[in-house]
Image (tube, rainbow, N blue to C red):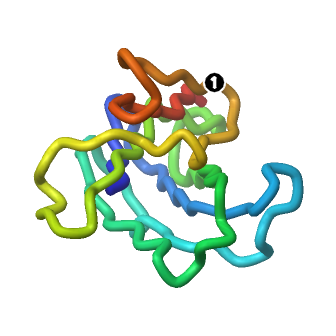
Amino acid sequence: MLTLAITNIIEQESLDVSIFGSADGATWDPKPVAAFPQKFYREEIPLLLNLMARPEIKFVRAHWEVGRWGRGTETPMFEFHVTLREVPQNSSPKLPGGCAGRRNFRGKRSDCRGENRQSCLCTLTSAI
């Protein structure tokens, strides 16, 4: 389960976040394995990422693009983070889980908190 949380934004801009997969953490698929809908406001958006059909993927990475239009500064400003939480196969996506040690975010800043890698929460955070 992925969650995109947009915590700060200014008006007249858009955010596109896509998730890419890799078998080795160095070579990334040319097409995203998932994408959030384009967003314009502060909110939290869940997205179920099912990699059962892609067992070769051991790493995931978030990629974002921003757009700005209208009056004011041309520089977009977003504060957001993407959270990955593993959901066991036989449970509801709403249940708590951990991120498997073999699936890691690659990005500007990532951290993994928790007692062990089986019950940790991996986040990728960026302020643009």
The residue sitting at 58% across, 38% down in the picture is 76
Which residue is identified by label 1? 109
Residue 127's spot in the image, x, y percent?
55, 26
Residue 9's spot in the image, x, y percent?
39, 35
Would residue 36 appear left or right of 73 to someone viewing this image?
A: left
Task: State which quarter of the image contains the C terminus.
Answer: top right
Locate residue 79: give its quadrant.
Answer: top left
Q: Is residue 63 visible?
A: no
Would residue 73 appear left or right of 119 to someone viewing this image?
A: right
Which residue is most to the right? Answer: 27
Residue 85's spot in the image, x, y percent?
34, 46
The residue sitting at 66% across, 52% down in the picture is 59
Q: Say which amino acid is labelled 1.
A: Arg
Residue 4's spot in the image, x, y percent?
36, 47
Task: State which quarter of the image contains the N terminus.
Answer: bottom left
Would residue 39 appear left or right of 14 to someone viewing this image?
A: left
Q: Is residue 81 above or below residue 47?
A: above
Which residue is most to the bottom? Answer: 53
